[in-house]
Image (cartoon, rainbow, N blue to C red):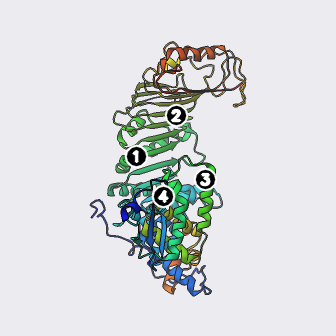
Amino acid sequence: MDGCINKQEDIDIKDYPAMMETSHSHVRYVSNNDSSSQEDEAGDKLSELPDDILVDIVGRLDLRTTVRAGAASRRWRHIPRLLPDLKIDVYELRPARPSPQSVDLALTAYAAATSWLLAPSTRRTIRTLVLSFYLIDPHLQTIGRAVEDVAERGGLEFLQFTMWTRPGSGDLDRDGESVGRLFMSFFDTYPTAFKCLTSLELEKIRFSESDISVLLNTCSKLRYLSLTECDSGPASHVKIDAPDSEICILKLQACGYRTVELVNVPKLAALYCTEWCGDNPPMRFGYVPCLKIISVSFACLVWQEPFKLSEWLPNCRNLYNLSLDFQDEKISWHTCNRNKCEDSAEKTNVPWDSSNFQHPSLTLLQIEGFAVEKTVMRYLRQLLCINPLFSVGNDGPLCHWFLLFVV
Amino acid sequence: MAAPESGDGNNGAARMVTLISSDNTRFEVEAAAASLSQTLQLTILDGGGGGGDGIPLPNVDSATLSKVLEYCIKHAPAAANGGAPNATAVDRAELERFDNEFVNIDQSVLYSLIMAAHNLEIEGLQSLVAKKVADMIKGKSPMEIRRTLGFPDPTPEEQAEMNAHMLEYGWAYE
């Protein structure tokens, strides 16, 4: 019936290990001798519910109970592998007692769980798959093959990977490149899976210069990408030129890039960039016609070049939400209380010059983490004059100014 | 005769429909509440269930139907409000309290309710009862699941199968 799922006959019975006759008797279970006949009747009925109701029930369980539920009765046996929407999180499989082997044990269990739960069945099409796991060989290959098979069978509507690096391997200079190579080889080995990928979260990876553009151009359904503590080498620059990409949301958190140049990212709608310590301005905008939301937090440290907001954003004509967080760093005499640092005073690297700031769609401008002083207020007054839609009584979109001052 | 009955009340009186359980008990209920059932919704939109007609529900007995309608009547205002995006926290908390109490029932009723919610396609009630069963078995071993849900004692073969499963999938049992 479904042409995509004809690889293998339904495997419910023949390969299910619980079907094996066994004389092992690690009997932990004891018989239940005291149940009343009325309860028996209700229990009989509960064990005989139709598949779709059982799927609805089992789909609400945590990972471990899901697997155990399959052993509870013959009638329930195949249910875990009829689930159309699966979330498999390696954190759920961490051993109760932490040890140096915890990560490997968890990932071993994870690979087993994944390949078991994703096994093909003629009776289901997997629609949603949310996986989070460690980027560690060799289990990575087991996971990759299982997902590749799902992708090849078709019908997958949402696929998310969240990939963690091994705890303790956070030093990019020492480990970043090998993790980067491992990720890119994973990416190359399972092309069908990555073609279905809709959401990707990565951390602590050192990419080569073109990796991100290649990734975005190849993963044609990828709409969300989050990179935490990633870079392409010390003080590196990255250009993202991805004309074929569908990426809508890009998050860069504590990434070590000096600059990010968005050369061509046609569908990008929202850009979040936190804890920036590279050049000022933190990113350059080429062709980003859909960009509506920019949220950046950066300290504007004393060594960072001053820049003008108006010159920074000329290609972002559809902006309607701009949020800038200066992380309490300066402006003028301010002493920082959030970051517990005394900042060098009298800085001028946020020139409050509004002469060319024209964003007719802008409805929310949020600036925080700076001290109120005259130049800032003058700047805001100028903005109100220059952007006609900002003025009161206009038919344009309502403007909201959220100015969160730190004094 | 059916026309004035099934028409929307012009004077603010809510339109009523009649549902007939498998044991022939008649329940008169607001159309808005009964329409939480996807199965009944079309019939009601077509003007059915009004006046002396009534909609027969051969798979639902009166005890279960009365319970189902209790749920529908409570949830109808929020459902009419498009899932009540503007509902106050108090309203939401009250519905949550009602739901928790509503499924605090013994297993034979729970079973009938699951089947009725399923047959009548009442989405909220389907989720509520499925969640109730899931919460009952979360974190339990296969044998504990059997006991909790009152499954009959396992046969020796079933017992052996469970043991084998535990050996094979040790990680799920830690």
Q: Amino acid at mark 2?
A: Tyr
Q: Mark 1 to mark 3: distance in Å?
A: 48 Å
Kindly check if marks 1 and 3 are in contact, taking CB atoms under 8 A apart as contact.
no
Question: Which of pointers 1 and 3 indicates the residue nearer the eye?
Answer: 3
The residue indicated by pointer 3 is B91
Kindly check if marks 1 and 2 are in contact, taking CB atoms under 8 A apart as contact.
no
Q: Identify the residue at image location x=69%, y=31%.
A: A339
- Could you tell me which quadrant the N terminus of chain A lies in? bottom left
The residue indicated by pointer 1 is A187
Q: Chain of mark 2?
A: A
x, y (%) of residue B74?
A: 55, 61
- Could you tell me which quadrant the C terminus of chain A lies in? top right
Q: Mark 2 to mark 4: distance in Å?
A: 50 Å
Task: Give SS at disc 2.
Answer: strand
Q: Mark 3 to mark 2: distance in Å?
A: 35 Å
Task: Give SS at disc 3.
Answer: helix
Q: Mark 1 to mark 2: distance in Å?
A: 24 Å
The residue indicated by pointer 4 is B14
Q: Amino acid at mark 4?
A: Ala
Of label 1 and label 2, which has the lower sequence position? 1
x, y (%) of residue A159?
A: 42, 50
Q: Mark 1 to mark 4: distance in Å?
A: 60 Å
* Nearer to me, B96 or A334: B96
- Horizontally, residue A404 falls left or right of residue B114, namely right
Q: Identify the residue at image location x=37%, y=71%.
A: A11
Q: Is residue A124 visible?
A: no
Q: Chain of mark 4?
A: B
Q: Amino acid at mark 1?
A: Phe
Task: Give SS at disc 1.
Answer: helix
